Image: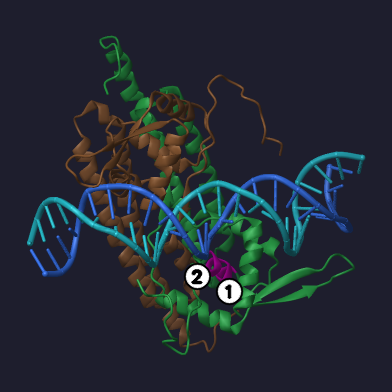
Chain colours: A brown, B green, C cyan, D blue
Amino acid sequence: MTASKRPARQARELPDLPITSWAVLGMLSFGKPMTGYDVKKWSDSVLHLFYWSPALSQVYLELRRLEEHGLATSDLVTDNDVRPRRVYQISPEGKTALDLWLDTAPVEPPVLKHTVALRLWLGQRANPERLRQILLEQNERSRELAASAERIRIGSHRYPQYAFQELVAEWAQKYYETEEKSALELLARIEEMTGLTEADELHRDDNPE
Amino acid sequence: MTASKRPARQARELPDLPITSWAVLGMLSFGKPMTGYDVKKWSDSVLHLFYWSPALSQVYLELRRLEEHGLATSDLVTDNDVRPRRVYQISPEGKTALDLWLDTAPVEPPVLKHTVALRLWLGQRANPERLRQILLEQNERSRELAASAERIRIGSHRYPQYAFQELVAEWAQKYYETEEKSALELLARIEEMTGLTEADELHRDDNPE
DNA sequence: CGTTGCATGTAAGGTGTTACATGATTAC
DNA sequence: GTAATCATGTAACACCTTACATGCAACG
């Protein structure tokens, strides 16, 4: 393809940044000035539910990059005589760029790396007891995430400016509740299957290949 | 942590490989000898539904790595006088290692990078019409993936040795059907919300921040 | 006769992780 | 007093992608 070097088509040209950058800029766009540490915490608790939480070192890198591009500004804040904290804020250019990104950047297909499904797919080779254990873990993990999403949803409720966060929290809650149920359904299916397999094994000597 | 250099704890020591390697080894474990190109094709059509499909160059790299570790073997096959194809097969050591991995490797939490949810989360800044469009695209994408999963499910039906593949295909079908519905529900919610917003705007001059 | 599929691989570079280094403050 | 939290950053490296290079076979 030849999409590499096109001249500025519009007065407002979007810098070519990874989605992670836009996610971090998006967090800044809610208006609260934040340190890298703050971004990481918020990222772990909320972004994590539907996107993913970058490593702390990555967060610092993204913030520096945003500042380089003029999309954010930072101030060194010294409260007492502690080590100064660097506090970031979105800039007007950052707001414009984010809006343009939301409006024009193509939406990449969501990425799912479902390690549990992968194991299940290879289930023929696996120990049924292990599969049971994996699905119980998955069920538990999903329950926790659903609960976490619920807390966030309730936390952002009745503040109209958080309507979209609330909407996504609600979506995430349903998503993880479905995951929770899915794991249990799969558990039941596997118990049927391996029950049959064990019966079959009485009549079979080696695995077919 | 000091988990870097530990001596062999067991006779059967697992090589430390990324999950992608195990996924590729898993594909080989179904018994069919495959070229890198074959692996990529299968990866695109099936693995993609629940894990993700590595780039072709990555597939070749993984296959080489598996062979280095003795988990797979390869043969150069020359059918006519075409360029020879390198055909990979799982080795007995590969089977043992895969089984051990399935049995003992900790299951990393599934990773979701939901680009649509990310955009929605930042929806306050976005153009409602654009959000509509994104959700319609997402609905369509999910419908296609559900259909794809269904075809695979039907294809593996009634072959008992494919029971787990069928199970995962069924799970994937439900997953994407849920995604499909989710997108439509969100669409409806957004129409309510932005309907209200537009009405509100008659009484408001600037966005709150 | 041009596009798609089959087929393999290298090179360059970006994305993102873990480990390391450092140190103050707060809570138990 | 010791563990957790707050806070910032560097270094090394693994993972993975895109672009490039190459070329035959089959289909339309």
Instruction: Give the labeled residue for mark 2.
Output: A122
Under mark 2, the amino acid is: Leu
Label pair 2/1, CB-CB below 8 angstroms = yes
Q: Where does the image place residue A138, in percent across and percent down from the top left?
A: 33, 62
Q: Where does the image place residue A185, in percent across and percent down from the top left?
A: 35, 61
Q: Which residues are magenta?
A: B20-27
Q: Chain of mark 2?
A: A
Instruction: Give the labeled residue for mark 1.
Output: B29
**Quarter of the view holding residue B40:** bottom right
Residue that extends furthest to the front in the rendered view of this protein: A81
Under mark 1, the amino acid is: Ser
Q: Would residue A176 be seen by someone viewing this image from the given angle?
A: yes
Horizontal side of B94 relative to A112 (left or right) equals right
Q: Where does the image place residue A85, in percent across and percent down from the top left?
A: 27, 42
Looking at the image, is A41 positioned above or below residue B125? below
Q: Secondary structure at mark 2?
A: loop
Kindly report the secondary structure that dominates the magenta region of the rendered protein. helix
